[in-house]
Image (tube, rainbow, N blue to C red):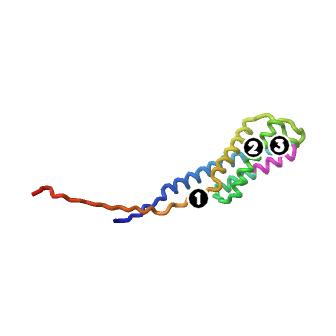
Amino acid sequence: MAQTSVPSTATADLHSSTRRGALAVAAGVLASAGAVHLQYAPEHMMEWAGFGLAFYAMGIAQLAGAVSLLAGVRSNAARSLAIWGNVAIALVWLLSRIVGLPIGPEPWHREALGAADVLCTVAEVWVALVVAALVGRAEVAPAPAVQVDAEVAIELEPAFSA
């Protein structure tokens, strides 16, 4: 009986590659959301300094989160911050559209919906979901080689019987 080792890293490589690809896409989407916040920060700063500073902080935090995803930071704390930070931003946005925020120059004034803010919020929720799906999952290690027992039997019969 012969034993042959067959490496089974192809599946592990596929999962790892898919995971890295998903994180790269999430990083790009998160960077886009950060860019939107930075683009609208000056406008919000003119409305009220607290809003403007919040937009700068959100934009910088989202860009930093995108960099950490691209860099492959494996810290669950960093990824949890990416999840809950984006969820918090989306919830504040939702509150500002439903009843208004309790702070600022016009407390409890509902903000109108805009294309940029809707797309940005969808992006934030999507990033939170993707990163949440990947948090806590260890990098898929290559599986150990599989031992295959093979027995080959060849029976030869004479072509002509006497």
Mark 3–mark 2 distance (CA, rounded to whole Å): 17 Å
Mark 1–mark 3 distance (CA, rounded to whole Å): 41 Å
Instruction: For marks 1 and 3, give the one nearer the viewer.
Output: 1
Instruction: State yes or no: residue 115 in magenta.
Output: no
Q: Secondary structure at mark 1?
A: loop
The kind of residue tagged 2 is Ala
Q: Determine contact: label 1, label 2, CB under 8 Å.
A: no
Location of mark 3 (residue): 44
| Residue nearest the observer in this picture, 2 or 90 | 2
Q: Which mark is residue 139?
A: 1
Mark 1–mark 2 distance (CA, rounded to whole Å): 29 Å
Q: Secondary structure at mark 3?
A: helix
* Disc with the residue nearer the chain's start (1 vs 3): 3
Residue at position x 72%, y 35% in the image: 115
Location of mark 2 (residue): 90
Image height check: is 156 above or below 118?
A: below
- Start and end of the magenta stretch? 48-59
* Disc with the residue nearer the chain's start (1 vs 2): 2
Residue at position x 54%, y 53% in the image: 15
Dot 1 alpha-carbon crowd within 10 angstroms: few under 14, some 14 to 19, many 20 or more: some
Residue extending furthest toward the top: 112
* Disc with the residue nearer the chain's start (3 vs 2): 3
Image height check: is 136 above or below 3?
A: above
Quarter of the image for the N terminus: give it: bottom left
